[in-house]
Image: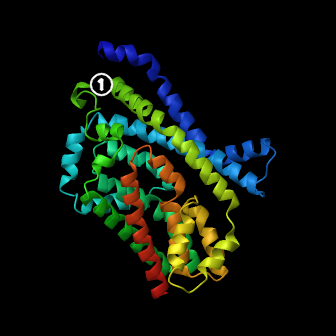
Amino acid sequence: MNASSTALAPWLWGLPLAAACWVLVYAHLTEIADLLTGLLGLTRATHLGESVHFFLYDTPKVLLLLTGIVFVMGVIQTFFAPERTRALLAGRRLGLGNAMAASLGIVTPFCSCSAVPLFIGFLSAGVPLGVTFSFLIAAPMVNEVALALLLGLFGWKVALLYLGMGLLVAIVAGLIIGELGMERHLEDWVRAIHAGEAKTASGEDLVWPERFQAGLKHVREIVGRVWPYVLVGIGLGALIHGYVPEDFMAAFMGRDVWWAVPAAVVLGVPMYTNAAGIIPIVEALIGKGAALGTTLAFMMSVIALSAPEMLILRKVLKWPLIATFIGVVATGILLVGYVFNLVL
């Protein structure tokens, strides 16, 4: 062990403890939110109580994910320089990389805001922009929870169609964004990391303490910039989550007119929840006469195009890239809604 690693050794003992605390807190987020909500004298049976509970649950969840993922990606980056990562993915840029990223998104239980940390991590490792967007879209839009619930509520045909259309939207949208060459619309600090300007020394020259130090530096640089946007985004989502009028939405979605699908998408964008949270609402809306395709378009817009997600992404992306992302994904969601209404 060289002099640098010896100097770093004392704080290394804190990493296992920090990791254990991370796992412990993450495993008990619901109980912690329940406890804190009760200590505030609130109950989830009220709009205010549900909003506060949502904020107390989702804030530590997203910040823990952000810190953990960015740290791990920072350590991994010391082994694989951005140039090497881009070289490995260069031959897959036209589709395979997008399909792999979208498939990864399906098996990660993230809502849209929770997927942003890994999105940032991918960019920092030099993964092409279009590939990272395929993950960002697929992670909240298609996951195993939604598939299982749709399978149980509506049968395998609906679940399979949802899976196929969601993957198609994520892959095609990522391809389009990648082909547009919009890396210049990343924020300057992200573009510097993505281009490899902020990388540390060559991985072959580093020992483990230095790799861990690089991970912590990664956390300070990225989490230190993004966390205020996380709080604002989740705060907005919590307010909407607790005060959404279900009957009002069903009234629009039940109308058999061409504008019902786009109206449902527009209605869903300001809202925020994950797939597991929105499925019961989907079931209730359909029970009140809403068309399935219209309701699924609403669900996808809530979990893939939420306003809180856009607020968090604003710290990473410039408005032209955010607008392109919204436009491409919204078009895909509209297609899903119309296809479902036509086929079923």
Q: Quadrant of the N terminus?
A: top left
Picture coordinates of residue 313, whole percent (x, y): 44, 48
For the residue carrying disc 1, how many other residues have a C-alpha within 10 Å: few (<14), some (14-19), or many (20+)?
some
Drawn side of residue 140 relative to residue 239, left or right:
left
Reply above or below: 228 against 11: below
Picture coordinates of residue 29, whole percent (x, y): 63, 45
User: SS of the residue at dot 1?
Assistant: loop
Residue 189 in sight here: yes
Drawn side of residue 51 relative to residue 230, left or right:
right
Q: Residue at (55%, 63%) from the top-left corner?
A: 275
Q: Which residue is at the far front?
A: 320
Q: Which residue is at the far right?
A: 41
Picture quadrant where residue 267 is located: bottom right
Q: How is the image coloured?
A: rainbow
Picture coordinates of residue 132, whole percent (x, y): 34, 53
Q: Residue at (63%, 45%) from the top-left corner?
A: 28
Residue 148 in sight here: no
Toward the viewer: 99 or 55? 55
Q: Residue at (53%, 44%) from the top-left corner?
A: 230
Residue topped by disc 1: 207
Q: Residue at (57%, 45%) from the top-left corner?
A: 232
Picture coordinates of residue 202, whole percent (x, y): 22, 29
Reply above or below: 79 against 5: below
* Residue type (three-letter) at the residue carrying disc 1: Val
Reply above or below: 225 against 11: below
Counting labels gives: 1
Drawn side of residue 102 relative to residue 265, left or right:
left
Toward the viewer: 171 or 324? 324
